[in-house]
Amino acid sequence: MALEEPLDEKWIACFHDSFRLSGVKQGDLVIVLSETASRPSLIHLAELGLARAGARVAQVKLQSARQPAGPAIRSTGNTEAAQDYSDLLAMLGGADLVVDVTVEGILHSPARQALLEAGGRVYMISNEHPEVLERCRPSTALAERVARSMQRLGAAKEMRVISPAGTDLTVDLRGAPVRGGAGFLAPEQPVAYWPAGLALCFPKAGTVRGTVVLDVGDVNLTFKRYIESRVRMTIEDDRVTEVAGDGLDAVSLRSYLASWQDPDAYTVSHVGWGLNPGAYWDSLHLYDKNEVNGTELRAIEGNFLFSTGANEFAGRFTKCHFDFPMRNCDLWIDDMQVLREGALTPAFA
Ligand SMILES: [Fe+2]
């Protein structure tokens, strides 16, 4: 159960700023979508921030879903709570905006599709301590930086990533849909999430090969822990064919992946890099696991973000998802260097 944070004035102001940046205006009808397991402070801060913007606010609270049979699910961006509510979400499409504070969010859920098809828009707020949202707050400057990265990533044919620990990964980028955002809804966007500040793509089938070595200080965001012992993943034809390493990190990763009994759990989901200067590598040390969701570390400027799990653009669907923000990588798209020893090059900064 999430701890309750105080409804600090500075956080109400911060939420208000994000809603205004997302175009919320006087008289808009905005639905705050939550579930019974949602963090209460996020529901209240959303309501208060929206009210300050002059919106007409209503709440819809779903029942959190029963735990399905199988391993615990994390980091999917696909709340089970909305599973049977596509009809309701379609009805909410008539509102000016849905603010999503469900625990996992509806980002990758069929319910989101129903909402969008009904003309709706959704602003998802990650299940984070408000301090994290404040630190990684959106801005138009960040939006320009993200747009530049997305444009170049979308135009590139190949990505290559190497690291001193032994990573050597090649991704054929042709046809890979690019995604990203700065943490607020631009006027033409139907979906945004906060915190953000990253650019990534979903490689098509049969395009990823090489080696990814998670090094000490990299992060496993599904387990919400820093890597303390190297993990070497061999990737052939998009698939992790070996997870090598003697430490707890490799042992636990092998064990959790195997517990899914799902070949698609081993496949590549998305690859990209972080761009948010408000996000910090060491912040995971400073919170209990139930206080944060890890979206800050996905967006750290200069990380290489490697992820396994669902990739609808490659025809793979699984609820086992890992995001691994990695340090100290060199990353190129075609002949343009994006990261040098884990820092953005001037062209991408
Ligand atoms: Fe991910």
Image (tube, rainbow, N blue to C red):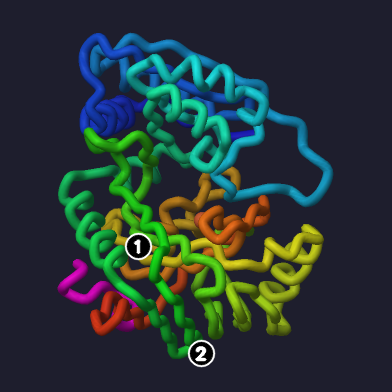
Q: Splitting the image into 4 quarters, where does residue 77 fall?
A: top right
Q: Residue at x 39, y 61 (%)?
A: 200
Q: Which residues are magenta?
A: 340-349
Name the residue at 29% across, 48% down: 182
Near-viewer residue (227 or 19): 19
- Callout 2: 10 Å neighbours few (<14), some, many (20+)? some
Question: Is residue 220 left or right of 67 when viewed as pictured?
Answer: left
Location of residue 256 in the rendering, given as x and y in whole percent from the top left corner: 75, 63
Compared to 61, does 311 lie above or below? below
Label 1 sits on residue: 274
**Residue 72 inside the magenta-drawn segment:** no
Q: Position of residue 59 (x, y in %)?
A: 48, 14
Q: Earlier in the sequence, mark 2 or mark 1?
A: 2
SS assignment at label 2: loop
Q: CA distance from mark 2 to mark 1?
A: 21 Å
Mark number displayed over residue 166: 2
Could you tell me if residue 224 is visible in this image?
A: no
For the residue labelled by badge 1, is the local secondary structure a helix, a strand or a loop?
strand
Residue 196 coordinates in the image, percent (x, y): 35, 49
Depth check: 232 or 111 in front? 111
Q: Is residue 209 visible?
A: yes
